[in-house]
Amino acid sequence: MAESDGKRPDGEGPAPSPYVVRDAEAFARNLARAVEQGGRALAAYLKPHEEGKPAELIAEATAEVVKTLGRIGEYWTSDPSRLMEAQTRLFASYFTIWQNAISAVGSAGASSAANSGDRRFNDPDWNENPMFSALKQLYLATTSWAEELVEEADDVDEPTRQKARFYLKQINNALSPTNFVLTNPEVLKITASSNAENLVRGMSMLADDVAAGKGLLLPRQSDMSAFKLGKNLATTPGKVVFQNELCQLIQYKQTAESAWKRPLLIVPPWINKFYVLDLTPEKSMIRWLVEQGHTVFVVSWVNPDARHADKGFEHYMREGILAALDAIKKATGEKQVNAVGYCVGGTLLAITLGYLAAGDKDGRIASATLLTAQVDFEFSGDLKVFADADHVASIEAEMKRAGYLEGSKMATAFNLLRSNDLIWPYVVNDYLKGKEPLPFDLLYWNADATRMPCANHSFYLRNCYLENNLSHGRVTIGGRRIDLSKVTIPIYNLATREDHIAPAKSVFIGCSSFGGPVRFVLTGSGHIAGVVNPPDRHKYQYWTGGRPTGSLDEWLKNAREHPGSWWEDWEAWLERLDNTRIKRRRRPGGGKLKPIEDAPGSYVKARAEPNQRSEPASL
């Protein structure tokens, strides 16, 4: 950047512009190399499209976007006066921006435009340079205007409006001037100073990533070579003490002198891998639980392939949770456990509770903790965009061809929920700035995608997102109707305030589905950071309050805010239920189950796409 007074550091004349190329010959050479690498990226994109199937999927998605936004357009174009009013509103904002830009020229390049906390526009020139300031304001004014059109379209039903919001957000995020070389001042300065070497590196990475994604773009979010399971991630000592076709069961080695008598079973989602709860040692929830004296068992789901196509929710219940309960009883001699279900693992746990309540009532699960888990899906957020009848039918047809849904498809859907955090910053960093991403354990885990077996995923989409059957008692598993009101054990129900996957409102409403006492707790942050929040980090906060009745907003008015992590509140809740302690259990398996291999086991190491460029030099 130039000095603030516009002079060279030595005081001899004006400082050179940071946007001027220093070596025209090197710049031209590198630009040609970047174009060559761009051609390689285009070839990698076109190769899988020669069969036509990816192109068909893209055409279907595009048609859905056009149809949805067309409904919004119909409302405004059906009344000329209404359309004129909307256009006048937009042009008035453009005129104001234009006037401000003209007045800023000649005034030392200063601008009073606020940055509004948008991290995309952190470079000082977005405010100090009149041209870039005007460009930013034009973009923000246009996107805000478009969002208002969606909200003010009176004749549009709410499901269509929700889809329109989501699609428009993706379009707005994609068209941000920060995403293009010629309209991003930071990228322009890097390009000038490096004589376009950044674009050569960026286009090379783009070609590699498109090839790895088999025609789909999967931006690298972390240095994948920096991590290895069992070495610097998922390092809490333990043993796999049981396995079947669908899962492994890990028992962790106890380190505290005394142990909780009642074991703890964790059921993670199969949409992602369990080691989000066992990242680096300082972030590991599993390690913290072991240090508190819990005998921790964790289900590690298989990364399914075509052999598992017919595995449905009942299989995941029987071969996952119920099989784990049998194994825990053998390993510890205990008849009861405290069970924890995370995300869809919590939905499966709730279904299992309903199944047990409808049948033998064996009481093997003494308490249940649901972490960002939904049982009522009426307000399940933007993921419902991917779960209308047409989408579900399309996904089912795709799954039937292979027997499963590719992990990259689910990863892309989740990334789109927060595209300004999980997609576009990496597009800019990787392909425009030409920088390799830094090592980040959570983003390494995020890129370690898992497949979805056909029967299981179809059941989930239809019974939960599409028809919302679970909370209304319309789900049948193993010949038993699941009625959650029959579940009377104590439940700790955790939601996170900024969750895009299991919105807090949705989790809160689900509390009323159960027939026993429910402790609802709300934490700060989102689906992952709000859950994986060790006490010694002193981050975020959580709210506790009365019974979860009425609306979430009403509950929050009388809730009490606490600084830091919710983990200790949960620990105190468990202690109130049963704080009986025994001598620590020294051997995983307890001599009854023979350890199979060291934690984290082999199932978690199977990657969804073996040829994916994120395969480390060996997750």
Image (cartoon, rainbow, N blue to C red):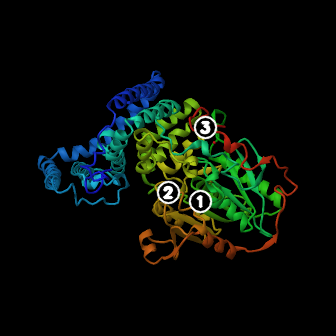
Closer to us: mark 2 or mark 1?
A: 2
Residue lying furthest right in this view? 591
Q: The residue under label 3 is which amino acid type?
A: Glu
Q: Secondary structure at mark 1?
A: loop
> Mark 1 to mark 3: distance in Å?
43 Å
Residue lying furthest top in this view? 50
> Mark 2 to mark 1: distance in Å?
21 Å
Q: Is residue 115 left or right of residue 228?
A: left
Q: Residues within 10 Å of mark 2 (few under 14, many from 20)?
A: many
Q: The residue under label 1 is which amino acid type?
A: Asp
Q: Secondary structure at mark 3?
A: loop
Dot placed on the residue nearer the N-terminal end, 1 or 3: 1
Dot placed on the residue nearer the N-terminal end, 3 or 2: 2
**x, y percent for residue 40:** 45, 25
Residue topped by disc 1: 483
Instruction: Identify the disc placed on residue 53.
Output: none
Q: Secondary structure at mark 2?
A: loop
What residue is drawn where x is 48% and y is 34%? 205
In this rendering, the answer to whether 454 lies above or below 269 is above
Q: Is residue 400 left or right of residue 94?
A: right
Q: Residues within 10 Å of mark 1 (few under 14, many from 20)?
A: many
In this rendering, the answer to whether 260 lies above or below 198 is below
**x, y percent for residue 261:** 78, 68
Closer to us: mark 1 or mark 3?
A: 3
Instruction: Identify the disc placed on residue 615.
Output: 3
Residue topped by disc 2: 502
**x, y percent for residue 614:** 57, 38
Q: The residue under label 2 is which amino acid type?
A: Ala
Pick whichever, 5 or 348, lies toward us: 5
Q: Quadrant of residue 225?
A: top right
